[in-house]
Image (cartoon, grey):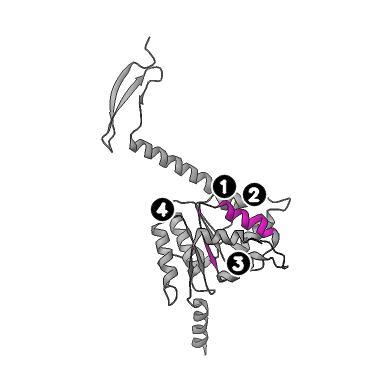
Amino acid sequence: MFADSEFEGVYCCIKCRQQIKRTYFPPKKQWGLNRACKCVQEESEKAQLESDRRHRRGQMERVFSQSIMNEDLKQASFQTFIPRSGTETAHRAALDFMETYETRKTGLLLYGPPGNGKSHLAAAIHHELNRQGFVCLFLDVPQLLKLAKSATKFNSKITLIDVINGAVACDLLTLDELGAGELLADEYKDVLFPILNGRQGKKTNITSNLDLSELEQWLFKDKWGNVIDKDGRLFDRILGSLDIYHNTGTSKRREDAMKRIQQGS
């Protein structure tokens, strides 16, 4: 009869050339390493990370089966972004975010007039990190609030908890058009606050057509004038977790419309 471990040998990693003692186990008819080299550990950690990302991406796609992003933004990239006067700072910030993503602690808040490229830059970041394997979610805020409301219906296949957990669990969340429309107390309490509060320590990007004082006021009272963020908790979390950039560029959509008008006259 063989003992549980009868033979010993040496394993040499092809990558790092480190030699590690190994033992042959006759009952299992296989060799076992006494410890793993750095290469094996890294491969194991990488496989675990990929498994975790696949799981989270699957859960996210189940909840957000219809991408909350318009067709133009689905095609957005840094290559198709047209730098214009006033967009330089936001453009540099977006590129820097990409280059430092894995080491940085903060997200971005890009605010300024409508149509000047804020959403394009945020979508470009989203697409590029998605290509790199990160689990990214891009949500138009008014559409997010509609989805959350429909999730409370008795015949909905998803729940409000599913919506919140999906937004909290992704690596990068982008909230586009924060401040658009009129906010309701329940939307603040049941959706926005749980999502942004739950993402503390994670990176979130936000775009808004409101300036900082307008955004603070939008979060302070609901559409009926009821105070919903008396102590400014959510606004404080935004200021503390995001680097803020004012995109002062004018609306490219308006400029394009004026050109078409002039060409047609």
Mark 1 to mark 2: distance in Å?
12 Å
Q: Residue at x 41, y 20 (%)?
A: 28
> Residue 62: x and y, percent?
59, 49
User: Badge 4: few (under 14), some or many (20 or more) residues near its Cα, within 10 Å?
Assistant: few
Side of 139 where 130 appears, left or right:
left
| Residue for badge 2 | 161
Question: Which element carries disc 3, helix, strand or loop?
Answer: helix
User: Pointer 1: residues within 10 angstroms few (<14), some, or many (20+)?
Assistant: some
Mark closer to the observer (4, 2): 4
In the picture of the structure, the residue carrying the numbered disc 4 is 103
Marks 3/4: CA–CA distance: 29 Å
**Residue 195 forms part of the magenta stretch:** yes
Q: CA distance from mark 1 to mark 3?
A: 32 Å
Indicate the quadrant where residue 34 lies.
top left
| Place of residue 48 in the rendered image (x, y in percent of width and height, measured from the top left) | 45, 40
Q: Nearer the viewer, mark 2 or mark 3?
A: 3
Q: Which mark is residue 90?
A: none
Point out the frontmost of discs 1 and 4: 4
| Residue 142 place in picture, x, y as percent | 62, 64
Front-most of residues 1 and 141: 141
Q: Along the polypeptide, which appears first: circle 3 or circle 4?
A: 4
Mark 2 or mark 3, earlier in chain: 2
Q: Is residue 85 above or below residue 64?
A: below
Q: Residue 233 lies in what quarter of the image? A: bottom right
Q: CA distance from mark 1 to mark 4?
A: 26 Å
Residue ID for mark 3? 216
Mark 2 → mark 3, Cα distance in angstroms:
26 Å
- Closer-to-camera residue (203/125): 203
First along the sequence among labels 1 and 3: 1
Which residue bears the numbered disc 1?
59
Mark 4: amino acid: Thr
Report crowding for label 2: few under 14, some 14 to 19, many 20 or more residues within 10 A (C-alpha).
Answer: some
